[in-house]
Image (spheres, coloured by chain):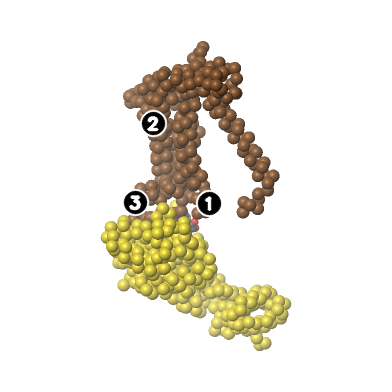
Chain colours: A yellow, B brown
Amino acid sequence: MTALSLSNVYKSFGPVEVLKDISLAVDEGEFVVFVGPSGCGKSTLLRVIAGLEDATDGTVEIGGEVVNEVPPAKRGIAMVFQTYALYPHLTVRGNMALGLKQEGQAKDVIEARIAEAARMLHLDPYLERRPAELSGGQRQRVAIGRAVVREPQLFLFDEPLSNLDAALRMNTRIEIADLHRKLGATMIYVTHDQIEAMTLADRIVVLRDGIVEQVGSPMELYNDPVNQFVAGFLGAPSMNFLPGGVLGKQAETAGIRPENLRIAEAGQLSGAVTHVEHLGGDTNVLVRIEAGEVLTLRLFGQHAHEVGDGVRVAFEERHLYLFDGAGARVR
Amino acid sequence: MLKARRNPVNVAAMHAVLIVYTLIALFPVFVILINSFKTRKAIFREPLSLPGADSFSLIGYETVLRQGDFFGYFQNSMIVTVASLFFILLFGAMAAFALAEYRFKGNTLMGLYLALGIMIPIRIGTVAILELMVSTGLVNTLMALILVYTAQGLPLAVFILSEFMRGVSDDLKNAGRIDGLSEYVIFFRLVLPLVRPAMATVAVFNMIPIWNDLWFPLILAPAEETKTLTLGSQVFIGQFVTDWNAVLSALSMAILPVLILYVIFSRQLIRGITSGAVK
Ligand SMILES: Nc1ncnc2c1ncn2[C@@H]1O[C@H](COP(=O)(O)OP(=O)(O)O)[C@@H](O)[C@H]1O
Ligand SMILES: [Mg+2]
């Protein structure tokens, strides 16, 4: 069944069109990630789904019902914000209870749901504390708990990990993935971080300037991007792009992923090492080839290359992605 | 962080400046207070000396309490000030919330219109206001004063509060909307507590001019039962003879309530500033 369906959604702020003709269907139980650079309209799209902004045009359906005119609280959604947005005057318990009280749930139902969410998110010791007395990671778990107790048809996350430090970000990411497995709920997750997108998503929606560039599973997008933007956005380090002529191709631009380049005696390109990053498990080597372009190579394991070394870089034809002048894929 | 910058010379200089300023600011109050407890002769002979065994006198306070309905005036001033502040804060905050929160046609224009009053003194309209009060039968009521002071205070209140309300996190308000809170609950329970320091600022800025005002009480409510403290104290100031004991005593007593209100608001102000710092 379709949990969420957007048809030809537009959103403008005055003369500025922020979302353009967005159509999308999300299946029940799916984890969909909207990813794109800052300012591309991800949050706006999420707010339109939540009902915090009205779509200028198009329809939003949740659970098969058109909800364009339904207020946020009645849409069967719950949202987790980047800034946590906890109610400062309420305890953790009060924060989680508020939405349920507004719905008119019975006291024992509220108690039971809070207890369950607190157990799942390890919040038991903090239930009587106020948000000011919690760390960032704890606050974000409370915000997630506040969403969980609502038992919504649709979870909406707006960059929930952006305010956390790297270690916490990974833990919380795993917790969110766990939560999705346990609840089996439909989740929409917005991020500008492609690693979060790749690791969490069943399906990724890549947005640019308010337009959907491509929709697909993480590996579909990684292996078969429809254009240069998607190819460059997913993957770290990102794909190398160079003029097609350098590789003897007709296409305007040729792309190749850093892990598909090797250093070999018989390499097709020659150049000099300009920088080396030793990561332990991987080594990133930057090579300036004779045509002047700098290529990033991602080598598995540890390699002793020095800046200034002359090297030859090898690649296989089947790993090349070709793009035309407008950035569209040439197959 | 502060410690590193604390150099003893700087600290001493800072305190010296603050102490000098405090002394200058408090000196007139101090002079009023000590002289209100002295005989008339002592006030003029040695205005700066403390009341001694032979110069001590409560004659000023006795006059004030005997003459006119001093406590009545007091009460009037209190009612007018507190009610005006209440309405300024309530309506100012509501208008500011609407301007800061909702997108509608003419939002900017409305904001400018509401702020216009900052630049135009309300006293220019005294004659019109008086005519209005006469025709609505509000002359010689405290309501007339409350209405005028509310109008006088609103522009600055809207201006300051809307700036602060723009700073309140959108996510917080949106979280409330998703949880099904009404706009009124979001306004009163989520937003107002967060702009409390700004509200205290507005209250302090408005309180003193209202409490001290002589103009509008004299014109709009000069009747005995609606006289404010400032107006009531004028009976002791004559063209030829001024009862200085009484004037000083009345002034001393008039300071008290403002002081209390000020302490209440300024504590809010400080609490707001420090709680904002640790977020
Ligand atoms: N309330 C608003 N009024 C005017 N422009 C807005 C508003 N909200 C967002 N925008 C604009 O819409 C664009 C997309 O914003 P947003 O959805 O927040 O981007 P993202 O979340 O992808 O970083 C931005 O250019 C932003 O300036
Ligand atoms: Mg955003």
Q: What is the three-letter code of the residue carrying label 3? A: Ser
For the residues labelled 3 and 2, the Cα–Cα distance comes to 32 Å
Task: State the residue position of label 1.
Answer: B277
| Side of B191 where A246 appears, left or right | right
Tell me the residue at 38%/69% (across/down): A119
The local crowd at label 1, few if under 14, some if 14 to 19, many if 20 or more residues have their Cα within 10 Å, is few
Q: What secondary structure is found at the residue carrying circle 3?
A: loop
- Decide which of tag 3 and tag 1 comes sooner along the chain: 3
Which three-letter amino acid code belongs to the residue tagged 2?
Answer: Ile
The disc numbered 2 marks a residue on which chain?
B
Q: In the figure, residue A144 lies in which quadrant?
A: bottom left
Task: From the viewer's perspective, tell me whether residue B189 is left or right of residue B254.
Answer: left
Q: Residues within 10 Å of mark 2 (few under 14, many from 20)?
A: some
**Residue for badge 2:** B79
Q: Residues within 10 Å of mark 3 (few under 14, many from 20)?
A: few
Q: Position of residue B183 (x, y in %)?
A: 36, 50
**In the foreground, B273 or B254:** B254
**Up-down: is B19 above or below A111?**
above
Q: Is residue B96 visible?
A: yes
Q: Which residue is mark 3?
A: B182
Indicate which disc, 2 or 1, sits on the residue closer to the N terminus: 2
Task: Tell me the CA gap for discs 3 and 1.
Answer: 29 Å
Picture coordinates of residue B250 (x, y %)? 47, 23
